[in-house]
Amino acid sequence: MMKRRDFLIGTGSAIAATAALGMPYLARAADKLKAAWIFIGPTGDMGWSYQHDLGRQAVAAKYGDRVETIKVENVPESADAERVLTQLANQGSKIIFTTSFGYMEPTLKVAKNFPNVYFEHATGYKRAPNVSTYAVRFYEGRTVQGTLAGRLTKSGIVGYVGSVPIPEVVGGINAFTQAFRKIRPDGKVKVIYVNEWFNPGKEADAAKALIDQGADIMCQHTDSPAPVQTAEARGVWSFGQSSDMAKFGPTRCVTSNVDNWAPYYVKRVGMVLDGTWKSTDTWGGLAAGMLVIPPFNKTVPQDIASEGYKVKQAIIDGTRHPFDGPVANQAGEIKVAAGSNMPDPEILGINWYVQGVEGDLRK
Amino acid sequence: MTELTAILVSMVLSATPLLLAAAGELVTEKSGVLNLGVEGMMIVGAVVGFGAEYNSGSAVMGFAAAAIGGALLAALFGFLTLFFLANQVATGLALTIFGLGLSALIGTAYIGKPLPHLPLLDIPGISDLPVVGPLIFGQDAIVYLSVAVTIAIAWFLSRTRLGLVLRSVGENHEAAHALGYPVRRIRFLAVLFGGAMSGLGGAYLSLAYTPLWSQGMTAGRGWIALALVVFSTWKPWRLLFGAYLFGFFSIVQLHAQGLAVPIAPEFLSMLPYLATILVLVIISRDAKRIRLNAPASLGKAFRATA
């Protein structure tokens, strides 16, 4: 794989200036708080890393001269990550965001060596005094999508392009299916995993296969807009992922599940500036503004749209839970009784499909 | 459309970028040059093609620019390996890394911008026939181009004088040189052709397959194209078969998942590669055949001695 170290906003030039002009500049450079981000892919992916990078840009815009942001793209989830993190910490980064699940161990390992540097690991579950974790309740958006899909579908078949069968993806499929089957009890959700997070061609292939098998709703938990675009070409409703993909489906993209990391990043960097940073675990959704659902496409009939907005509001208000009972697994066994909700730890680690999803889940 | 028709139509589409890039590389390798930079040339073609179509509004301009972009990158490779005698393997790998970085740089302006799909051939009555309609009479222009170019290459290599010269350069550059053939010039042209074809293959991804630009969107297809050339034992017809076989397996595994066939998706994802390796093994059992077809001077630097 390509290893492109893309240090933004003149880390290099800052060093050069220090060397040329001597100590006074070094002192001034040290006044600036250095905040760093590492990314699993290119920030030009228009998906996962892109959204994280928007958060970084929000930090740069908010704090201006007080903060210097640094980004490193295409960091493999391996010993390479440790090396990059160590380098960033050595260069004086005060807070480092590691934006992929696979950075969990490298983050903890490097954090141990730099007790005065704050680390923030996205979507992980292991913390330390100087390591926080944060994630988005993506599944909340799936409930809105499932509701809209239930009203929009004719065939009752949903095509779902998955990346890899991890709890985050499975939980999204389940939340979608629960909401979908509340409206279409006979509905089916077909899932195809492409086993990659980002491969436009393969995602398009999967979308085509699903449409060819009768799906008239296209859902995705991969990062490229290819499924949305394919659905548009085939006249099928779709839901975008990570970023707002409306442009790729002008008439058929209903809405997208947009990750919004900016409020969190701005808050956490602010805490470092104030000296109030503490190790925490954040799992925010629609209410926290970490998950954003842009206005639905104008082509969606008014009554269906307003039902969707109502569900969204209900989730924000806490009157609707994406996994409100009864929730049954594929075999029909009740896993969550009527009247109760699935607890957070179970959602976080979910490794089974609810009724209505087709096919076996490989564990 | 029936399931089978759907699989076959998608198979042709997914094979097309591979076929274009691999056909170009086949000609390059037949001239004795191993250019491992296919992935880099493809992705540069993808971004240049996207930019050209985005700014001009013409798909033809897009593909033309992509071919030129791929050829320019190949020219760099050609200069380094043929005139400065740089190691072909190392230069090719560097070209891929360079192409990925360069395309990311050029592409920043095009992230998140959509383009329309290419129009499909539509002959009233005929394109609606079952199976053959959508499969043979309902594709976009580049699909037909990829098949036509492959056939033309087969004809060129085996039936024309220039094709014979190109092959002789690839087999024994000393002998070809002694006979008075301009080894370097022929190889350079073959490298350019390979680059242009890779550029087209990349542009097929960004202009037709998924009309969008995103960094790293070729996702390793250049490497598959390289493998296909070996798989085909440097024969264009077999290349056509190999590309479609690969396309078939990569599509069939997705359909199998959609139909909830109880096989691990990870295993199904492996199938196209497994099939390629298997056929490779079967073909390679016949050592004579491999030796007969592999260009004898492949990857060797040529230094004119006399």
Image (cartoon, helix red, strand yellow):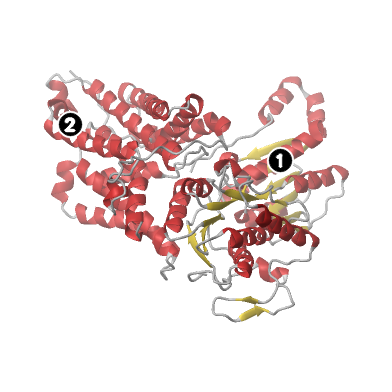
B279 displayed left or right of A131: left
Q: Are marks 2 and 1 on the same chain?
A: no
Calculate the distance from the C-alpha at mark 2 to the C-alpha at mark 1: 54 Å
Q: Is residue A239 above or below residue B116?
A: below
Where disc 2 sits, the SS reads helix
Residue A326 lies, in percent from the top left, at 67, 77
A8 displayed left or right of B89: right
Q: Nearer the viewer, residue B141 or A257?
A: B141
- Residue under the image location 32 percent in, 59 percent down: B4
Which chain contains the residue that carries disc 1? A
Residue A37 lies, in percent from the top left, at 68, 43
Read off the residue under disc 1.
Answer: A56
Where disc 1 sits, the SS reads helix
Instruction: Please tell me whether mark 2 or mark 1 is closer to you in this view.
Output: 2
A316 displayed left or right of B7: right
Residue B272, numbered label: none
Type of residue at label 2? Phe
B183 displayed left or right of B79: left
Q: Are marks 2 and 1 in contact (CB under 8 Å)?
A: no
- Residue under the image location 49 percent in, 71 percent down: A360
Q: Nearer the viewer, residue A36 or A158?
A: A158
Q: Is residue A111 above or below residue B294?
A: below
Type of residue at label 1? Arg
- Residue A167 sits in quarter: bottom right
Residue A65 lies, in percent from the top left, at 80, 30
- Residue B196 sits in quarter: top left
Q: Is residue B94 above or below residue A115?
A: above
Residue A14 lies, in percent from the top left, at 71, 27
Which chain contains the residue that carries disc 2? B
Read off the residue under disc 2.
Answer: B156
